[in-house]
Image: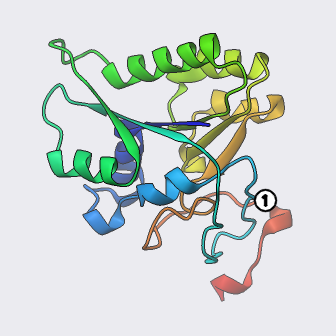
Amino acid sequence: MYILIDGENIDATLGVNILKRTPRAEERPRWDRVLEFDPFTHKKSVEANETSAPAETTHNSTGLFFLNSSQRTAAPFVQALLAIGWQPIQLMSDDYERKVVDEGIQRTLEAILDVRPEADVVLGTHDVDYLPQIEALLEAGHRVAILCFREFLALPLAELEDRGLIIHDLELDVQAFNLPLNRTHPVNIDDFDPYPYL
């Protein structure tokens, strides 16, 4: 299983859309939990306030964490990723307008399609830029999952659930955070529990 993380996208969504500021260290995802999470065996949470511990997993995975190093990447963060088992992919370009992380992930998804016909793929992002690659992987029979804050996932990606895409919430399903995030998000009426709001 390959786990690809769009570090820029996850961090920007957390900071801009949820926290409305730069996340503090304790508010960022626990990337070790993300690496251990198996989206293909995990049962989705149905309650937004569920607090059970993440399930232990024993899957083999390759974690590829994509970073834009065109300006500067924090060396301690890269070292922390290495220490917990991630492979940081630090991409750069002299053209600061170039979306190096998007390009790197797109190329990696295409390479998996080309040379790893049985591989499961997990992508941490909200970005529609990977839609063609995800569609191609699904059409070729790959199991594909997205890890995101569901309410911010690009609609064309969300619509791929009908074609087999599995979507898990980073906070509610992966339980990647030590602190609860101040989020409002849609809840299916069949899953709605009014008691936590009383």
Graded by Cα atoms within 10 Å as few (under 14), some (14 to 19) or many (20 or more), the crowding at tag 1 reads few
Q: Secondary structure at mark 1?
A: loop
According to the picture, the residue beneath numbered tag 1 turns out to be 188
Camera-side residue of 7 and 153: 7
Q: Is residue 74 left or right of residue 27?
A: left
Camera-side residue of 4 and 46: 4
Outermost residue, right direction? 190
Residue 135 spot, x, y in % from top left:
69, 19
Question: In the rendered image, which quarter is residue 53 located in?
Answer: bottom right
Question: In the rendered image, which quarter is residue 20 located in?
Answer: bottom left
Q: Is residue 132 left or right of residue 44?
A: left
**How many numbered tags mark residues here?**
1
Question: In the rendered image, which quarter is residue 185 located in?
Answer: bottom right
**Residue at the image position 30 percent from the left and 34 percent from the top:** 67
Residue 182 spot, x, y in % from top left:
46, 68
Residue 78 spot, x, y in % from top left:
25, 45
**Residue at the image position 60 percent from the left and 45 percent from the top:** 60
In the picture shown, does residue 188 fall above or below 88? Answer: below
Residue 122 spot, x, y in % from top left:
60, 37
In the picture shown, does residue 190 fall above or below 35? Answer: below
Which colour scheme appears in the figure?
rainbow
**Residue at the image position 86 percent from the left and 65 percent from the top:** 190
Q: Is residue 45 left or right of residue 101?
A: right
Outermost residue, bottom direction? 198
Q: Is residue 59 left or right of residue 141?
A: left
Which quadrant of the rendered structure holds the N terminus?
top right
Type of residue at label 1? Asn
In the picture shown, does residue 85 fall above or below 63? Answer: below
Which quadrant of the rendered structure holds the C terminus?
bottom right
